[in-house]
Amino acid sequence: MIKLNEKERKILRIENPVECIIVERVNRFVVKVCLDGKLCMAYINNTGRLLEYLAKGRKGFCIKNEKRGKTDYRLFSLRENDFGVVIDTQLQMKAFEKALEMKLIPRLSGCKILRRNAKLGLSLIDYLLECNRKKVYLEVKSAVLREGKYAMYPDCPSSRGRKHIKELIDHVQRGGRGIILFIAALPQVESFRPNKSADPEMYELLRKAYKSEVDIKSINLYYNPEDSIICLFNSNLKIVIENLEKKINTAIKKILISPLFLFSISVCFQTIQSHFESPY
């Protein structure tokens, strides 16, 4: 029996999932799986490389494909120890919407969805939200690549992803509001980090977005096969952008050792001391 973490919040139930075994990836959108000893074609809607997940012999989870076509099933998750990595981007977004509805995401608790696939410049951004009577564009990115305790995005160069980030930067610089939300859809991660080696230009754009006050957030969720439920584990996953963290830490150290700061602390302590020594 799987021991659930007390922080886990059940947010989205998966109806009639079946376990399968990966045989091979046929193309960008189709993977061959073995299901109850029978070979089937399963659809995948995640366009990342997913090399570590779609290896032969890896166990996964499928659901019946509602859209009849060349595939009978849809591969939505790959087993990782007792839990599952949610590779299905549509289910990731459904889980996000449910978490938003349940007011489980800090600083988005006052938000509601106005529109999906909202036009911004020359791009379609995943959501237009209304947050405390202000309109906010929010773009979702799937972060299922793992490096130790880090969830990362992207796992390959993404011109489309760069285009969306540029649109949000331009919008915020013109006075609007924008959010990039990375969904770390895999168990047992502690932070999100951009994958600089896969797309250096994307990394620099994210640094620029951060400096431009585009809000960068990450949430952590995964699939629990025992209950057939996608669970939210961390609604405010730590963001690690290396160069920015170094600069912030250096700036803090400079402030702490500056003569003005030390003088201000000294004056403060003298004032407190004289207050307690006074009979009045």
Image (tube, grey):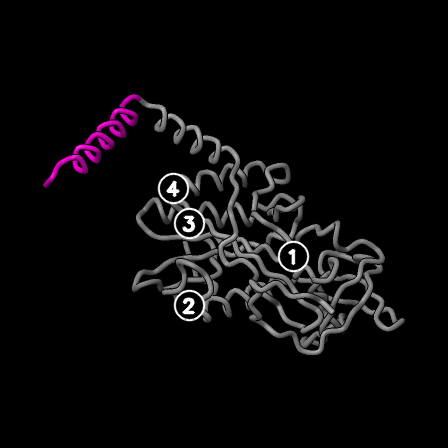
- Vertical placement of 50 versus 39: above or below? above
Q: Which residue is mark 2?
A: 113
Query: Which span of residues is magenta-colored?
Result: 259-280
* Residue appearing at x 31%, y 60% in the figure: 134
- Checking the image for residue 232, the label placed there is none
Q: Secondary structure at mark 3?
A: strand
- Give the image quarter of residue 142: bottom right
Q: Please tell me whether the stretch drawn in magenta is mainly helix, strand or loop.
A: helix
Q: Nearer the viewer, mark 3 or mark 1?
A: 1
Q: Is residue 27 magenta?
A: no
What separation in Å lies between label 2 and label 4 (alpha carbons)?
24 Å
- Residue 226 position in % (x across, y down): 71, 71
Q: Which residue is mark 3?
A: 215
Q: Amino acid at mark 4?
A: Ser
Q: Which residue is mark 4?
A: 212
What separation in Å lies between label 3 and label 1 (alpha carbons)?
24 Å
As drawn, the residue found furthest toward the front would be: 279
Q: Amino acid at mark 3?
A: Asp
* Residue appearing at x 66%, y 55% in the figure: 47
Q: Which residue is mark 1?
A: 187
Mark 3 vs 1: CB contact within 8 A:
no
Q: Amino acid at mark 1?
A: Pro
